[in-house]
Image (cartoon, rainbow, N blue to C red):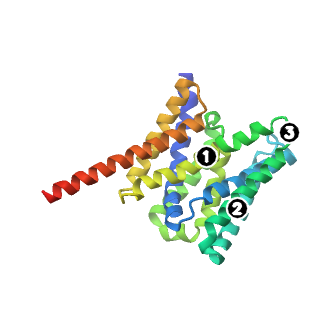
Amino acid sequence: MQILEISFPVFVAGLLILASHIPLGHQVLKRGIVFIDLAIAQVAALGTVLASQLHGHADHPWLLQGMAILFALLGVGLVAWINKNFPEWREAFIGLIYVTAASALVLLVAGQPKGGQLLTSTLSGDILWLDWNDLILLGIVAVFVQLLAYFAPEKLERFFYLVFAVTITLSVVNAGIYLVFVCLIAPALASIVYRRSKLWSYSVGSVGFVMGLMIAWHYDLPSGACIVVSIILTLLLALMVQQLSGKTLTTDQKI
C-alpha cells in the first residue's frame, strides 16, 4: 500500500509529462531541431542551480522555477535567432549552447561537497519523490498544450518556442534532462517513422514509463535511467511491429 501511495503520483506525473511533450515532440521533429531539448533543458538547469546557489532551494522554490524559466526563454530566444539567421548550421549552434551551459554548470558547482550529486540530479532527476503538489503546474501545462494541439495547432506552431521553454523547464526540474529528452523524442518517433496514428506515441510513452517504473521499484534501481531505457526499448519494439505489419499488408495486397 505504501509503494502504491508513493508510485501513483509518479505514474500521474509521467502521463502529464507525456501529454505535454508528445505534441511538442512532433513539432521538434517537424522543424528538424532535435537537440533543442537537451540545450534548453541544460540552460534551464543552469538557471536553477544558479538561483539555488544565491538564495537556497528550501526558502525560495518559486525563485528557482522563475530563474529556470527565464534562462530557458533566453535560450529559446537565442535558438530562434540562430534558426532565422543560420538555418543550415542550427544543429551545430544548438550543440554548442548545450556544451556551454553544461560546462558553466560544472564550473558553478566545482569544489562543492555535493557538486557531483547536484549534477547527477539535473541529468536523472528525482521523479520518485514527487508528491501531488508537484503535479499542479505539470497538469496545467499538459492541459494547455493538449488544447493548443487539438483546437489551435496553428497557434502552437506560432508560439512554439515560448510554450516549449516553459514546458521543458517545468519537466526538467521534476524529472531531469535525460527523461525529458526521451519523453519528447521517442514517443513522437513511434508514430512518425511509419506515418501511423498518434495513438502509437501515447501508447509507447505510457507503456515504457510504467514498465520502467515497475522495474526500478522491483530491483531498487535509479528510476530515471530505468524509465529512459524502457521507453526506448518499447519504441524499438513498436517500430518492429509496425514494420512487420506493413510487410504483411503489402504481401496481402499483392495476393
Q: Which tag is nearer the camera, tag 1 or tag 2?
A: 2
Looking at the picture, how far across and down is residue 62, in whole percent? 75, 49
Q: Residue at x 53, y 49 (%)?
A: 183
- Disc 2 marks a residue whose amino acid type is Leu
Q: Secondary structure at mark 1?
A: helix
Q: Residue at x 54, y 24 (%)?
A: 219
Give the labeled residue for mark 3.
Answer: 112
In terms of sequence position, does the residue under pointer 2 or pointer 3 come before the other?
Answer: 2
Q: Is 137 in front, or is 79? A: 79
The residue closer to the viewer here, 75 or 238, is 238
* Quarter holding residue 150: bottom left
Instruction: Verify CB contact (< 8 Å) between mark 1 and mark 3.
Output: no
> Picture coordinates of residue 28 (x, y %)?
54, 62
Point out which mark residue 124 bears: none
Sequence-earlier tag: 1 or 3: 3
Q: Is 135 situated left or right of 243 in this image?
A: right
Query: Mark 1 or mark 2, which has the lower sequence index?
Result: 2
Residue at 29% x, 49% y: name it.
244
Residue beneath label 2, please? 96
Q: Which amino acid type corresponds to the residue marked 3 in the rendered image?
A: Gln
The residue at which mark 1 appears reads as: 178
Whether residue 12 is visible, yes or no, is no
Task: Give the vertical position of 119 relative to 218 (above or below).
Answer: below
Number of numbered discs: 3
